[in-house]
């Protein structure tokens, strides 16, 4: 697998905690979207670490095509 699967064509609004690290699913196969559950094994695609700089709601990319990965940049509107 060289290209990720779009989990959905919309962002995942997610509450994050300041200082906590998250593993964003980059392959699109995780059953725990938008976070990694290990489904990427054997795909050649690794999750991307995100550490929250503050407690807030962030919008993780669901289409897996954002230039600003792991956060949504609106790319899903173009695919």
Image: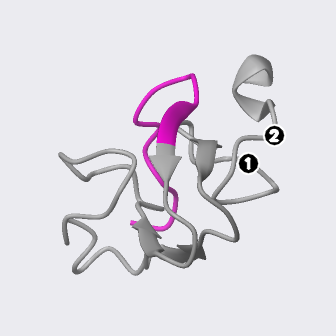
SS class of the residue under badge 1?
loop
- Residue 64 x %, y %: 57, 48
- Residue 67 x %, y %: 81, 55
Q: Which mark is residue 5?
A: none
Judge whether residue 6 is colored magenta: yes
Q: Is residue 60 visible?
A: no
Give the labeled residue for mark 2.
Answer: 73
Give the labeled residue for mark 1.
Answer: 66
- Residue 74 x %, y %: 80, 30
**Are the residues at dot 2 and dot 1 in contact (C-beta closer than 8 Å)?**
yes
Q: Which residues are magenta?
A: 1-14
Callout 2 crowding tier (Cα within 10 Å): few <14, some 14–19, many ≥20: some
Query: Who comes first in sequence, dot 2 or dot 1?
Result: 1
Does 78 sit left or right of 50 as displayed?
right
SS class of the residue under badge 2?
loop
The quadrant of the picture occupied by the C terminus is top right
């Amino acid at each position: 697998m060289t290209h990720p699967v779009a989990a959905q064509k919309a962002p995942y609004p997610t509450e994050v905690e300041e200082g906590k690290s998250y593993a964003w699913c980059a392959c699109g196969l995780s059953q725990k979207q938008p976070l990694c559950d290990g489904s990427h094994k054997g795909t050649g695609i690794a999750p991307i670490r995100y550490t929250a700089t503050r407690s807030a709601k962030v919008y993780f990319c669901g289409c897996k095509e954002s230039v600003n990965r792991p956060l949504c940049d609106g790319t899903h509107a173009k695919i």
